[in-house]
Image: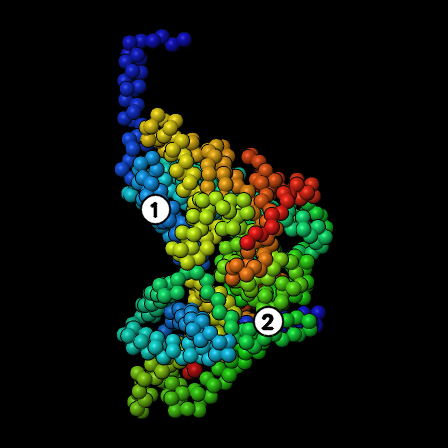
Amino acid sequence: MTELTRRAALATTASALAAPWILPRSALGQQKPAKLRIGISTFLSGPASVFGVPGRNAADLLIEHLNAKGGIAGVPVEALVIDEAPGVNFLLGECRRLVQNENVDVMLASISSGSCLAVAPLAEELRMPNIMWDCGTQRIFEEGTWRYSVRTQANAVPEIVAPLLYLLKIRPDVQTVAVVNQDYAWGRDSWAIWKTAMEAIKPGIRVVAELFPKFGATDFSTEITRLQALRPDVVFSTSWGGELDTFIRQAAERRLFERSLFVLPLAESSLERVGKTLPEGVIVGARGDHWFLHPTARGNGRLDGFVAEYRKRYGAWPIYPTFHMAQALFALEAAYTKALAANGGVWPSREQLMDTLRGLEFDHLTGRMKIRPDGQGLEPMLIGVSKHVPEYPFPVLDQMVLFPPELTMNPMGTKGLDWVKGLTMETVAKAPAPIPYKA
Amino acid sequence: MGLLLLLAVLDGLAYAGQLFMVAVGLTLVFGVLKILNVAHGSLFAIGAYVAATLIGWFGAEELSLLALAIAALAVGALLGPSIERGLLARIYDKEHVLQLLVTFALFMILEDLQKLLWGVQPRFEDAPVRLLGQVEVGGIFYTAYQLLLLPGVALVALLLLVWFLRRTLLGRSIVAVTHDREAAVAIGIDARFVYLSTFTIGAGLAALGGALAAPTTSLVPGIGVQMIVLSFAVVATAGLGQIEGAAVTALLIGLARSLAVYFAPELEVVVPYLLMVAVLLIRPAGLFGRRELRRV
């Protein structure tokens, strides 16, 4: 055992006394700031602005509401929004600037999976609390452990598994499938999940065409001709934005919907734009349980108030990115509130905030959700079929199934692509009962 | 197999028609002005947005085809002379790099202008497609707009352009200026007017390409970029300044792309560029390009 000398005792005491000044100020409980500055990265330009701008709009609306009731624990919130469109290098530079020059307290980054994969290590380096508010790749928490990042929504695995379970529930006799996905990471990854899960649940379904038109394609006529000739039972597409709209319109004009059942996991965000061009009976997803006519949350003041105000201000119905943004902001508010209470009213450090976010349960627009200890959010998946009703000039969702996360999301510590190999028809049988549309 | 080939050819023809309309304006402008106009893609996009707006305003399906023509004429007549006189006329004697940068800057400005005027949400106006209905070929439904109108307009545009350049005074003046500007000016041809006319026609063709594309696709920010990249591939493969060459190349690329979708889908995205690389390796001036010969 080492002998305690007078010199050692003095050094230890001095170190202990100096610690609060040596450690970064943010590592300790702090004084309440005059303002809580949130950096938000989203697409303000380019094709993905169809999601980015509604997300930004939701942030504006909800932050205004937060501030109207005094902010978070009396601290007003200010958002600094940056555009993700110029690319990852630009985004990383902007995040650095926001944290180091603008003293941003928290980042909400981002929409693109590529952006999220790049921002997570930067968040570690800068010790910057980061809420991934919309990106979908499952790889983030499967391949890395992040102290300063959490995700307040699900990921690609349940977003693809849920529509597959829905399809096999209503059409167990499917024989042939074709895919038309955008030729980039999401298009390829989502197909890999679908194909692997489909082969596990129902081996023998034949893939008759794998079509990956270039990202940003404006014409799908050749793909549509080929699909008409092949007549697959199911056409699967995770395309989004203008490309999905174009695909739907061109397919409708050429009567492809009459020959194949379409499964479109992101089509909720296109419904208002394509209107009743999208026929009835198409399987539609919403990257979570995001639907302004949510079957169980409809009628609660929170959802209805948000939908009415969003519609009034922006002239459109809220789509899934607005719900994702709401989840990130509600999680942030709940985490600060909880951390403050646990900290005896002292403003939490960045680390205390992150510790609180992990395992946090919080209410949002359509229910209550949880963030896992690894930082991954758990939310139900709402899948339904399109239905034309007189109340709306676009299709609504009917026969909605709310798939719980335990049925569609791989457990912590496993990899989604491996986990889906264990899915069976028993998983399909566990799907909850559908809820019909009510006017 | 025979039916599949026929379907692939029909798809290729439709796509080639659309591609040619954009590429021909680009190659015409380069042939005469010697400027590679990056902002050509913006003129395509603005033509498309204006057409969609006019279709919406007109309301009646029967007037939708008229809206396409008016959009092309309006964009060509307004933006063509403004850009040529206001910007390009000042940089004709500058280096190519500078010219490229100026047209790129213009492209960026016009992209932002589109977002300012039409927002970022996708727009879709398909009244002309609905108006013309469907055609059935071997049990496969096509839209008449795509199968007949697009290639038809492209063919008429090609024939008119060739006739105009070979048979009219202005067309011959354009050819003369392209061949030897100094000699043309010496015999009394107004080169300034020739440049203005050529750019206006080029702008009008880009806008017409956009207007014709508008009813078939969603208009989103960045739509001009997609088209300009492919048009460059057509123009480079054909040889800069080659109008008939652009038509043949557009057809080759259209057919190669549709055959790829049928028989090797993985190659769909790269087929136009593979074709371009293959041609340029064998004929660096392009399929129809010849050094020291007139460009139009």
| A2 relative position to B277: left or right | left
Q: Chain of mark 2?
A: B
The disc labelled 2 sits on which kind of residue?
Answer: Asp
Residue pictured at 40% horizontal, 42% vertical: A329
Residue B11 in picture, x, y percent from top left: 59, 71
Q: Please name whichever residue, B129 or B44, is drawn nearer the observer in this view of the structure.
A: B129
Look at the numbered discs 1 and 2 and tell me whether their residues touch, using CB distance below 8 Å. no
Residue at numbered disc 1: A64
Q: Nearer the viewer, mark 1 or mark 2?
A: 1
Q: Tell me the quarter of the image containing the C terminus of chain A.
A: bottom right
Q: Same subunit under labels 1 and 2?
A: no
Residue pictured at 66% horizontal, 60% vertical: A260
Q: Tell me the quarter of the image containing the N terminus of chain A.
A: top left
Q: Does B204 sit above or below residue A218?
A: below
Residue B31 in picture, x, y percent from top left: 40, 78
| B150 relative position to A171: left or right | left
